[in-house]
Image: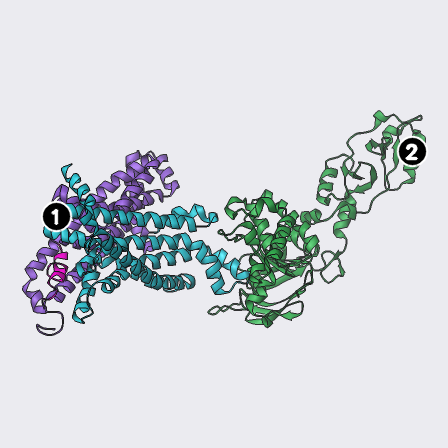
Amino acid sequence: MEFLGEVVAWFANPETWSGRNGIPIRLWEHVSLAAAALAVGTLIALPLGMLIGHTGRGALAVVSIANIGRAIPSLGWFGIVFVPALNLGLGLGFWPSVIALVPLAVPPIVTNTYTGLREVDRDLVEAARGMGMREWQILRRLEIPVALPVILAGIRTSAVQVVATATLAAVIAGGTLGQLILVGINIGDEVQVFGAALLVALLAIVTELSFAAIQRAATSPGLRDRGSAAELSV
Amino acid sequence: MQDASGAVVAFEHVTKRYPGSDAPAVDNLTLTVPAGEICVLVGPSGCGKTTSMKMVNRLIEPTGGRITIGGEDIMSLPAVELRRRIGYVIQQVGLFPHLTIGENTAVVPKLLRWKADRTRKRTDELLDIVGLDPARYRDRYPNELSGGERQRVGVARALAADPPVMLMDEPFGAVDPIRRDGLQNEFLRLQSRVRKTIIFVTHDVDEAIKMGDRIAILQRGGILAQYDTPAAILANPASEFVERFVGADRGLKRLSMGRVRDLDHIEPVIVRSGEDRAEIRKRLDRSDELTFALLVDDDNRPLGWIDQHDLRGDGPIDPGAATPGAPTVEPESTLRDALSAMLGSSVQLGVVVDERGRVAGLVSVDAIGERLRAPVRGVDGELHEVGEADATS
Amino acid sequence: MSDGEGPIRIGWIVDRLDLLGELLRDHVILTVLAVVIGLIISFGLALAIRGSPRLYGPIIGVSGTLYAIPSIALFSLLIPITGVSIVTAEIALVSYTLLILIRNIVEGLNGVPPEAIEAANGMGYTRTQRLLRVELPLALPVIVAGLRIATVTTVGLVTVTALIGLGGLGYLIVNLGILRGSSPFAATAIYTGVALAVALAVFADLALLALQRALTPWARRRSA
């Protein structure tokens, strides 16, 4: 109980909210880093997933990407990026952290986009083609809208993962709320560690919930009963 | 081929070979479907009926021969533009689940970049045509509709841009048998209004007979076994394959196609209550076909048969003497139903009655038999003797 | 490559084989403990969900929330309660396995063909017999699929425990690597750590796959 009191006191302390190590700056670092990584990851993953999903070719590549993505520890990516960033004198911080996070952002989006498009009933695609839709019209007017819940579920998984892992950017000077945790661990300040960890957890949950809300709002009412299928394909 | 309600579709020596396969899927198919008629492609699985149909809108490209619509080679247009001028209905209906019924119906007009208000007007008109109240259905999604309703939307969608030609791939195959019959009738009524040229694929020979103005029976390897009117095919199967395919009950199927109005009627000897027996005997003797007189009421509705036994002696006929149960049939009744009714009665005659139940004539079991032996009009417009092409005779 | 050339120093690795072995062993222990405990808990919860399906929503909701909490945050949140100990690491690691395992067990059991269940009932199996002899074997491919994902994920997460001073291969990446960025051996330590972690993950994945194929000969063609 006493400990929780200290945590409350930590949050109430104006110093916690000010300066280079204050929550606002670290939170901003965290969010902007995650947003950048998610944006870059989405830009890479969406076209790739759509290409593979629409043509049905390259499914093996999808599986491989997903497996490799999973087998390399998220901390490992920071280590992998760290060495060249340091040796080549590129410096540490924001961009190396983005690069380390992109590989985590890509696989769920590629997998879900691919799966989502492939799950679109082949009869629908045939009907669309029979009515005279061009390939890109089939993709844009049929496959993407129908697969949208599943695609958004992939982006949601990615977003949560990136927000969570952005914490580790602190180890390569990327700042973020993780910095507060690492500093806290180093100086033995359990209160700060706990407080910062609480914030990170909260941020992850907020991300999860907001993306879930976006996913619901963007799903055509005609597809509502497919929501559960989208959840399962995380 | 834009404005005509229907357009002639012609296959000329059309062949489809798939790479890596020796036997062609469709082999030198030549047939012409006149404008505004339904041509049913029917046959066992692997006969190439669906392949043949899909070559018309180039979902499958022919490897030989040519197909024309309204005299125009289908290869003269880019495939997507061709497809937008051909209605397409598939078994699974294929409504887009993320679009409302209105939006689904408007897919092709939208591809053709119609103005919004024109599209909207057309959509409502179409939903109305297929019997769905636009106000109730326009903004619903496919998952809120029953199978039959979805099928109607599928037809509306195919009709949207008023295409001269429609392709239908087992359109009623996924509907339960009871509702299928209703949808078929409804579609035939619709077709009698819109008069499209329709290529209709099914594996069900009964559906083919019911829906087709003409039927193309295909056999394995994409070979055209027979192309004729349903009546002509049933009367004169061109080969043993066709005979087996249409079934051993093809005589009964022919009965289902014929109507009582097609039969020669016999003039009945009409008797009313109170007429003199000797007089009636005289009139019966003059008829060489009848041994029974028909007793009717004041409104000319049949009451029963009067036989020689009832006519013995003199004096007025007693209405109680009539044997009740004269089977009545209507001009629109099928010969099958008429025969069934007649066989159930002791006198093998049917009384044809009009819509108010008044006697219009008599038909006999013999007349039905004669009708089955009468020449049948074929796809060439000529009359053909029954059995003349029968492979087994 | 030899010492003095390129980023990878083979000599450094050879000199520290004992340490590597120790770290690998710690890593395996942390992983196996987490997955086994996670599996036991997930089974209990999955069976509870089968008993009353209304529990599915809340259980998946809670484990989904746990899954969303960043690992380092979860470790940190636990330190004030359980200190820097293996218990801290395991509570967090187990939490992460739950979502995947519960979902796959439930999905696997739901996917058992109803006719198989009916046949089992008809032949007089008790509920337990039916579960053990019919449902579990048939659900095994889906369950193992979840187990594989959970195991591979856990191998990765164990590296993070190095940040709170626990063992595992993360020690190579963090303590001997990134935190000693200026050392000529940092790169070697980092790449060795990542490579071993990946190797361990791949090995565990293939081993579980092999186990599943051995146990479910009838499903071999489908999972191929």
Q: Is residue C35 magenta?
A: no
Q: Which quadrant does the N terminus of chain B fall into?
A: bottom right
Left/right placement of residue B133 relative to residue B380 reads: left
Q: Colour of chain C?
A: purple
Segment tinted magenta in the rendering = C168-182
Q: What is the basis of the colouring in this image?
A: by chain
Checking the image for residue B281, the label placed there is: 2
Q: Is residue C169 magenta?
A: yes
Q: Is residue B328 above or below residue A72?
A: above
Q: Position of residue A59 (x, y in %)?
A: 36, 62
Q: Which residue is mark 1?
A: A189
Quarter-of-image position of residue A26: bottom left
Q: Colour of chain A?
A: cyan
Q: Position of residue C130 (x, y in %)?
A: 31, 37
Alpha carbon separation for disc pair 1 and 2: 127 Å
Q: Chain of mark 1?
A: A
Q: Residue at x 44, y 45 (%)?
A: A225
